Amino acid sequence: MNPIAPHITAFLRERLPLERRASQNTCDAYAYSFQLLFGFASLRLGIPPSDLQFEHVDAPLVMAFLDHLQTQRANSPRTRNLRLAAIKSFMRFMEYRLPSALDQIRRVLACPKMRTDGRVVHFLSPQEQKAMLDAPDPRTRAGTRDRALCHLAVAGGLRVSELISLRLDDLTFRGRYVDVRVHGKGRKERVLPLWKEVGDSLRAWLAIRGNANAPEVFLNARNEPLTRSGVAFILRRNQAVALGVCQSLGGKHVSPHVLRHSCGINVLNATGDIRKVALWLGHEQTATSEIYVAGDPSQKLEILKAMVPPSLRPGKFSPPDALIASLKPAQKPR
């Protein structure tokens, strides 16, 4: 039996950050996946996580863990596949560290991914976007911060990880305009030149932000960097306020990624070019941006205007008179 602790430590502290140069977000996501896996294995096997052995993490346990994610934690197939990807990456790392377990590793690597639904993206209409931007109260410190946060999310299409990791030295003001350096997925950076309205919102927040020790732009009430859950709470609070102005927001789940999708739709409507959508949102491949073509109803309306519907032969169904129909003899079965 081989304790799993030294191997997972080497994977998270050496393999990912040093050898693979994975981003901090990737390292955190993988660490959380194994936190869930080891917690599940501890309860299933009745031993503390520190006593887990590598041999315990076999294919049946992994499949039971994936089923637990969907049935008990109500995770989507996409989240399930992300947890499985982390486990498989660790197993490929172990192929060279523990050759005696190659058969076990091969069986875990054979665990199948689950097919995901290709759903239409959710986004906010221009009226809903305006209601969300007008919801924060600019007369308060929290409202000024929320307005700048929402304005940047809608105008720049930043992911939540990009929003909370944005630093003061990533902002460059040119008069009333602002250039935002975004640290995206896969260590890719992009610079967004944003409008003066966004620059005014950010400048108003920075004027009252204070000299906190944290270098991040957006802070909470304790002058600590905002977290993902903190951003989600801010959006829920402002959605409740905006609901009084825009009733259509009542049936929608407004998340940071919904604001990002709204930005993608705005860019597509303005330019009509998915390459520019990919450039603005930081997509590595333009195929990723094609979801906005499928989700934008205006694209389908343009197709209807450009096409000529096929003509049909005129005719109308006329039911027979009820009296005449009752006098006809019934057909005899053959």
Image: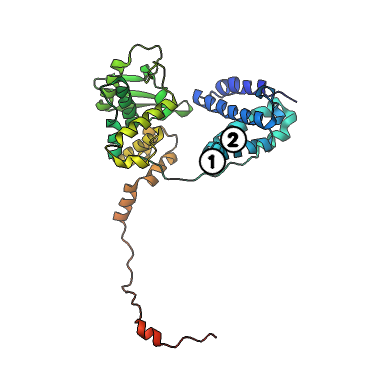
Rendered image coloring scheme? rainbow
At 31% from the left and 25% from the top, the residue drawn is 148
**Disc 2 marks which amino acid?**
Leu
Q: CA distance from mark 1 to mark 2?
A: 10 Å
Between residues 246 and 259, which one lies in front from this camera angle? 246
At 39% from the left and 32% from the top, the residue drawn is 256
At 32% from the left and 37% from the top, the residue drawn is 267
10 Å crowding of disc 2: few (<14), some (14-19), many (20+): many
Query: Disc 2 designates what residue?
Result: 84
Helix, strand or loop at label 2? It is helix
- Residue 88, quarter of the rendered image: top right
Q: Position of residue 271 (x, y in %)?
A: 30, 40
**Disc 1 marks which amino acid?**
Pro
Helix, strand or loop at label 1? It is helix
- Res. 308 visible in picture: yes
Between residues 313 and 236, which one lies in front from this camera angle? 236
- Whichever of labels 1 and 2 marks the residue nearer the N terminus, that label is 1
Q: Position of residue 19 (x, y in %)?
A: 58, 22
Residue 77 lies, with reference to residue 222, above or below; the image says below
Residue 301 lies, with reference to residue 28, above or below; the image says below
Q: Position of residue 94 (x, y in %)?
A: 67, 28
Q: Position of residue 223 (x, y in %)?
A: 39, 15
Q: Which mark is residue 77?
A: 1
Q: Quadrant of the N terminus?
A: top right
10 Å crowding of disc 1: few (<14), some (14-19), many (20+): some
Q: Please indicate whether residue 91 sits to the left or right of residue 183 in the image.
A: right
Between residues 162 and 321, which one lies in front from this camera angle? 321
Residue 294 lies, with reference to residue 262, above or below; the image says below
Q: Please indicate whether residue 301 sits to the left or right of residue 228 in the image.
A: left
Q: Which mark is residue 239?
A: none
- Res. 183 visible in picture: no
At 31% from the left and 17% from the top, the residue drawn is 206
